[in-house]
Image (spheres, grey):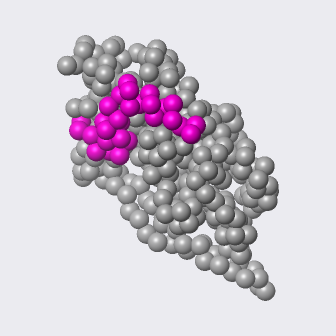
């Protein structure tokens, strides 16, 4: 049964502190698998190259900080919807764990190890939650004993019903994307570019009306800006390419144990990889007498359809493109 909604006050910090008052949520935050995320860069290889004056400290450019703030947004929406404490807890825990399987360098190396090992960060996350690795067993016991594990997994996978908060994870503008775009803007442009995460979450899940639509329209245009000016820019694509090429060119083996390390271990074991990323903003164009490789990628254009309402208003167009690089 739903409880009376809390008053909509406070920013991200307030809603994170409010969630942390719950002992089970606090135990998840203090678990080894979640603390490991403090050593995983949010943007992966692109976080190691210089693209501008960052508005975030190194400590805040991590998967841990992202997950904490997604959990804060989850708590803000769940509390204001008046969900029961049990449902709210599960939504917040799912938000904390949605990226728990990310390997060092996040998405940058994932295509390589997914090809080599046959699974990606989502499957790795499920293995961590299930306690398949020694250091993850205490978290797995906590989840089995104190939570409905099937609900947490359904929320993470975007399969839970709306009355249990499923839309927070499955909607086109969801709590993961809201913090992700804000964090990308802050990391790469040094500014939030007029975006407030609480305001976007409020517009997406709680408020109705023209003002909320303006907020969401601005967010969607920021998503287009972030992807095309930074993430799939030449510098961003080359950072990912350098990361994957390192493992392929030098036949560096990866196993599951490597995937649950922190990036500090990778920097020690793979110094050439991180040296290749240093100063990686410099473009690699085709040059006479040098071998040229084609780097295919999907270019996404996020645009607002004024003729549509609700989620249909927010469109994405994809097309295959190729970047030529010296290999």
In this view, the residue in front, 327 or 38, is 38
The residue drawn where x is 73% and y is 82% is 291
Q: Is residue 301 left or right of residue 297?
A: left
Residue 126 spot, x, y in % from top left: 44, 46
The quadrant of the picture occupied by the C terminus is: bottom right
Magenta portion: prevailing SS class: helix
The quadrant of the picture occupied by the N terminus is: top left
In this view, the residue in front, 121 or 206, is 121
Specify the quadrant of the image occupied by residue 301: bottom left
The residue drawn where x is 79% and y is 55% is 271
Residue 317 spot, x, y in % from top left: 38, 62
In this view, the residue in front, 266 or 148, is 148
Magenta stretch? 134-162
Q: Is residue 26 left or right of residue 78?
A: right
Q: Is residue 196 above or below residue 120?
A: above
The residue drawn where x is 28% and y is 45% is 159
Q: Is residue 27 above or below residue 271?
A: above
Q: Is residue 19 above or below residue 156?
A: above
Total of numbered circles in the picture? 0
| Residue 37 shows in this picture | yes
> Is residue 148 within the magenta segment?
yes
Residue 113 spot, x, y in % from top left: 57, 61
| Residue 183 shows in this picture | no
> Is residue 214 within the magenta segment?
no
Q: Is residue 315 above or below residue 37?
A: below
Residue 304 spot, x, y in % from top left: 35, 51
């Amino acid at each position: 049964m739903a409880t009376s909604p809390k008053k909509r006050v406070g920013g991200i910090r307030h809603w994170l502190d409010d969630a942390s008052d719950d002992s089970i949520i606090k135990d998840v935050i203090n678990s080894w698998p979640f603390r490991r995320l403090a050593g995983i860069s949010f943007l992966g290889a692109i976080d190691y190259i210089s693209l501008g004056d960052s508005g975030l400290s190194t400590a805040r450019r991590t998967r841990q900080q992202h997950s904490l703030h997604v959990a804060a947004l989850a708590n803000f929406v769940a509390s204001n919807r008046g969900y029961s404490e049990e449902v709210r807890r599960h939504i917040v825990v799912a938000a904390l764990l949605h990226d728990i399987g990310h390997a060092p360098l996040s998405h940058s190396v994932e295509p390589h190890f997914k090809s080599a090992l046959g699974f990606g960060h989502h499957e790795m996350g499920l293995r961590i939650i299930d306690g398949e690795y020694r250091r993850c067993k205490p978290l797995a016991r906590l989840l089995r004993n104190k939570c409905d594990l099937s609900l947490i997994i359904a929320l993470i996978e975007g399969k839970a019903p709306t009355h249990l908060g499923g839309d927070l994870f499955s909607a086109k503008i969801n709590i993961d994307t809201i913090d992700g775009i804000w964090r990308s803007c802050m990391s790469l442009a040094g500014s939030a570019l007029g975006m407030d995460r609480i305001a976007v979450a409020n517009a997406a899940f709680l408020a109705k009306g023209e003002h909320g639509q303006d907020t969401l329209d601005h967010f969607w245009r920021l998503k287009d800006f972030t992807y095309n000016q930074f993430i799939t820019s030449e510098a961003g694509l080359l950072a990912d390419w350098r990361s994957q090429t390192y493992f392929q060119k030098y036949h560096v083996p990866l196993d599951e144990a490597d995937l649950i390390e922190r990036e500090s271990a990778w920097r020690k074991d793979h110094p050439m990889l991180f040296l290749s990323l240093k100063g990686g903003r410099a473009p690699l164009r085709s040059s006479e007498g040098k071998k040229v490789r084609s780097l295919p990628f999907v270019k996404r254009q996020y645009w607002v359809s004024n003729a549509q309402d609700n989620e249909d208003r927010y469109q994405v167009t994809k097309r295959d493109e190729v970047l030529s690089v010296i290999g």
